[in-house]
Image (cartoon, rainbow, N blue to C red):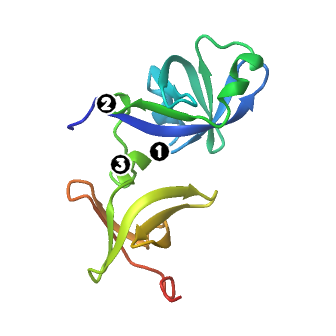
Amino acid sequence: MSGSNKTVLIGKIQATQGIRGQLRVIPFAGDASSISQIDSVMIKSPTGALERFPVVSAKAHGKRVILTLKPFDNINQVLHLVGREIYADRGALPDLPSDEYYWSDLLGLQVVTAQGEALGELVDIIETGSNDVYVVKLDGREVLIPALEDVVLSVDLAANSMTVSLPEGLLDL
């Protein structure tokens, strides 16, 4: 796959976990196992710089991942990291099953209906708990599309497109 040295967003630090410097992370791709297979992550600082940290462990905790990074072993060392985004090298991430995608692969896709109507660009993904919601923008208009199997018909990364079947009434304003 080309662009394997690309940096991709893989999650966000939601909170600290316990007192030993562990972090509770919302994974933006796959599940905990995809994060647990990488040996280092980068955390974005307020200035936008990425700082790399070795991964000591990453364990699934419900829909979250409990991440332990070197050199942190105390809650006071990681409090300032809460709310920050976590990145990884795309080439270090495992391949996902054919029906799963990393958020970074979906952002920027052109979204069209099965009838060929252009809905716009996928600009954001909202995690709601039950299913993700894709935010699609076109000419200042925003459409929120539930990321459900019967709504998202196909994703073609090579063609930079996603085809959707909108639920009845979704576009009726």
Above or below, comparing residue 105 to residue 116 in the picture: above
Question: Which kind of residue does numbered mark 3 sit on?
Answer: Asp
Q: Nearer the viewer, residue 97 or 118?
A: 118
Q: 10 Å neighbourhood of mark 1: few (<14), some, or many (≥20)?
A: some
Q: Is residue 102 visible?
A: no
Above or below, comparing residue 100 to residue 13 in the picture: below
Q: Which SS class for mark 3?
A: helix
List x then y, in percent, for residue 66: 64, 30
Give residue 30's mark.
1
Residue at (74, 14) in percent of width and height: 74
Q: 10 Å neighbourhood of mark 2: few (<14), some, or many (≥20)?
A: some
Give residue 105's mark.
3
Tell me how far mark 2 sits from mark 1, CA to CA. 15 Å
Residue at (52, 33) in percent of width and height: 86
Of the numbered discs 2 and 1, the one sitting upstream in the chain is: 1
Above or below, comparing residue 21 to residue 123 in the picture: above
Residue at (48, 71) in percent of width and height: 142
List x then y, in percent, for residue 30: 47, 44
Question: Which kind of residue does numbered mark 2 sit on?
Answer: Gly
List x then y, in percent, for residue 60: 61, 35
Tell me how far mark 2 sits from mark 3, CA to CA. 13 Å
| Circle 2/circle 3 CB separation < 8 Å | no
| Circle 2/circle 1 CB separation < 8 Å | no
Decide if residue 154 is on the left or right side of residue 65: left
Question: Which kind of residue does numbered mark 1 sit on?
Answer: Gly
Decide if residue 57 is on the left or right side of residue 30: right
Q: Which SS class for mark 1?
A: loop
Residue at (48, 38) in percent of width and height: 10
Q: Which residue lies under the disc numbered 2? A: 91
* Mark 1 or 3: the one toward you: 3
List x then y, in percent, for residue 112: 32, 73
